[in-house]
Image (cartoon, coloured by chain):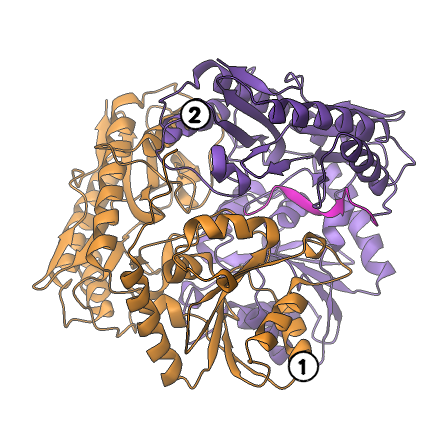
Chain colours: A orange, B purple
Amino acid sequence: MTTFEKNFTTSEYQRRIDKTRAAMSGRGLDAIFVSDPSNMSWLTGYDGWSFYVFQGVVLTQEGEPVWWGRSMDAVGAQRTVFMDEEDSIRGYDDTYVQNPEKHPMEDLSKLLSELGLEKARIGVEMDNYYYSATAHEVLKKQLPKAGLQDATGLVNWQRAVKSEREIEYMQRAARIVEAMHAQILEVAEPGMRKNDLIAEIYATGIRGALGYWGDYPAIVPMAPSGLDATAPHLTWDDRPLEVGEATFFEIAGAHRRYQCPQSRTLFLGEVPQKYRDAEAAVLDAIEAGLEQAKPGNQAQDIANAFNATLKKGGFEKDSRCGYAIGISYPPDWGERTISFRRGDTTVLEPGMTFHFMPALWLDDGGLEITEPILITEDGHECFCTTPRELWVKA
Amino acid sequence: MTTFEKNFTTSEYQRRIDKTRAAMSGRGLDAIFVSDPSNMSWLTGYDGWSFYVFQGVVLTQEGEPVWWGRSMDAVGAQRTVFMDEEDSIRGYDDTYVQNPEKHPMEDLSKLLSELGLEKARIGVEMDNYYYSATAHEVLKKQLPKAGLQDATGLVNWQRAVKSEREIEYMQRAARIVEAMHAQILEVAEPGMRKNDLIAEIYATGIRGALGYWGDYPAIVPMAPSGLDATAPHLTWDDRPLEVGEATFFEIAGAHRRYQCPQSRTLFLGEVPQKYRDAEAAVLDAIEAGLEQAKPGNQAQDIANAFNATLKKGGFEKDSRCGYAIGISYPPDWGERTISFRRGDTTVLEPGMTFHFMPALWLDDGGLEITEPILITEDGHECFCTTPRELWVKA
């Protein structure tokens, strides 16, 4: 049978681990327990839809990381992680799963003790997905001599600058999201049920592009029309596309868990002047923002240039206009580190990747024209070639 | 334009709230803050992919529940919740989003104070998704006089017995998952890339069936083949279907967020005797389990009957063989309350709905033949009519 292709070389994982260990040292941490599935995957290669139960990766200053999770998922770990040693994959008994009588963290605390960490300074992701308040309390109680410290974002920040292979995966995801947008433009028409259009988007995204298979996006396709588009995160139903309404498509291509989100807006029928004005203002503001997208500048420089230009065009936006992207699992395709907004002074570096996401929500609809970008040695590249404009089908 | 159809009547939401308030009283709680998206939706109708930021519903013993979340999502709340009063939807400023400098729970604590709850006994979902250890610490710090208590599962348990309308939605989801399985059987063949098959599954599920539109399942379709099928939660890639391998399809139809999961297994080529033996054992054990699926029996009765019969057939299963289902959001389509396993003494009642999920993971593959069921007045009904057998395409 065909074998499972590992996503990265062992030496790439080793570089990531080295980088993470340096950050741990900087924070005085002997170990971290990482439960964010994106961080687990980035450190070890682990991939599976098992994050609805407690699981994580333990990384100390020596040896291989240890994958820990439900016993039945240990088999999936064996098939996806880079680690060789038998002890590097540890499963807990199924009776711990969703059982009010006992908690998986009791098992984890035993493992941490076995690893000699009962008195260690251990970083945990206190403000991340899939690590609960109870998980934290149980761990504290079981390891009273350990110093549990908040390490939310510690690994996420190590992910900011992408390797060549990671960029390649994002470029493949970019080809996929281009194909998804092309399909929308091809098939969308008045009277089409929204769910039928979503089915086309999904099918195109998962078939992939140029022979690259599509993985699941970390957020489902969003495509609200008309007034629903004033609300950014409504999902679909079966109401048909109507003439005189704008629909925005906030979608991502995905390949080997790497995400390339990009949004476009389609207007059916004659475009009101307000939408043309908004389009012009957003396109100018995107250009102004992109001019600032270069190494040495700060994240906020992009937001400030974007907002100033948008204001000149007569529009305002009070939410952030971009965020870091890369490998991701539901519920979010952002890396939850750098934001394009006033006050974010992170200095841009070559290899950083962002979704420049200047969405405008108007009083009767939404306009999203966005660009996933890569910071290069001397500026930036847009990942996609999707035409940057308000789409219209008359 | 077509208006958004509310999923349930206001009086149905009121009944749910009454039931929840009684449970709160029983636990001595003045209020609860519910952050599980399924619980938020069940109590208020709120629907949107916004659970990647902090949000929730505050329910006290009086008046309407209060939806609280990111300002931009307040618009989505206006379009989906049943509440009428302006004060029942409260948004927080976008600068709170994923910003290490401040935490959304600071805003929530102000709201709770405004609602007169600064000294109240407030239940929070400490061991649920989308409520973090930091969220809990910030809330404790901001409301030092409040008594925060763990109310994990409090609302989930109220959801166990379904209303007629809920059952109707699950029946629609059942039609959809039947259509998904029929499509698999129609198109799967040796050489087909797995991702192309997943694209068909998604498209069929979202197009829906009998005119009922398909919503997104709370878990992506899982369809591992051969050795990968020994690991239950691996997602797809592009390796082709091969002769001599079994592939299990763990998928769900969904309608208005109600989930109807059902699994089947497809063998391409000549079936080894081991799979035939496993099939026979599982089918017998399912029959034995279903005989126990009636009001008055306990959840564990189904598991015990299933396991005893399976053992007679020469197989063992050490994980639970079923769980409650209904409305759900990622990352899990289970309700996380009742499990079919030894020790679960929950008494079955008419209107309860389960995924009877007796999956077997063999040493070289997996066999899943499962049934979503409804407990009726005098026994049970299977939601689906999908033929209960190992599928074979030669």
Left or right placement of residue B189 versus residue B332 in this view = left
State the residue lying farthest toward the front. B273
State the residue lying farthest toward the right. B296
Determine crowd level at label 1: few under 14, some 14-19, many 20+ residues with C-alpha closer than 10 A: few
Location of residue B118 in the rendering, given as x and y in whole percent from the top left corner: 69, 75
Q: How many marks?
A: 2
Check residue A310 for magenta coloring: no
The image quadrant of residue A368 is top left
Location of residue A352 in the rendering, given as x and y in whole percent from the top left corner: 22, 62
Residue at screen point 78% across, 23% down: B381
The span shown in magenta is: B331-343
Q: Is residue A334 above or below residue B30?
A: above
| Subunit that carries the residue with mark 2 | B
Left or right placement of residue B203 versus residue B301 in this view = left
* Residue A136 shows up from this direction: no
Between marks 1 and 2, how big is the CA–CA gap?
50 Å
Location of residue B11 in the rendering, given as x and y in whole percent from the top left corner: 75, 38
| Subunit that carries the residue with mark 1 | B
Residue at screen point 23% across, 42% down: A172
**Which numbered disc flags the more N-terminal residue, 1 or 2?**
1
* Residue A142 shows up from this direction: yes
Disc 1 secondary structure class: loop
Tell me the residue that label 2 is attached to.
B203
Amino acid at pointer 2? Ala
User: Is B292 or B101 nearer to us in this picture?
Assistant: B292
Q: Is residue A213 above or below residue A139?
A: above
Amino acid at pointer 1? Pro
Disc 2 secondary structure class: helix
Check residue B338 for magenta coloring: yes
Tell me the residue that label 1 is attached to.
B144
Determine crowd level at label 2: few under 14, some 14-19, many 20+ residues with C-alpha closer than 10 A: many
Left or right placement of residue A282 versus residue B299 in this view = left
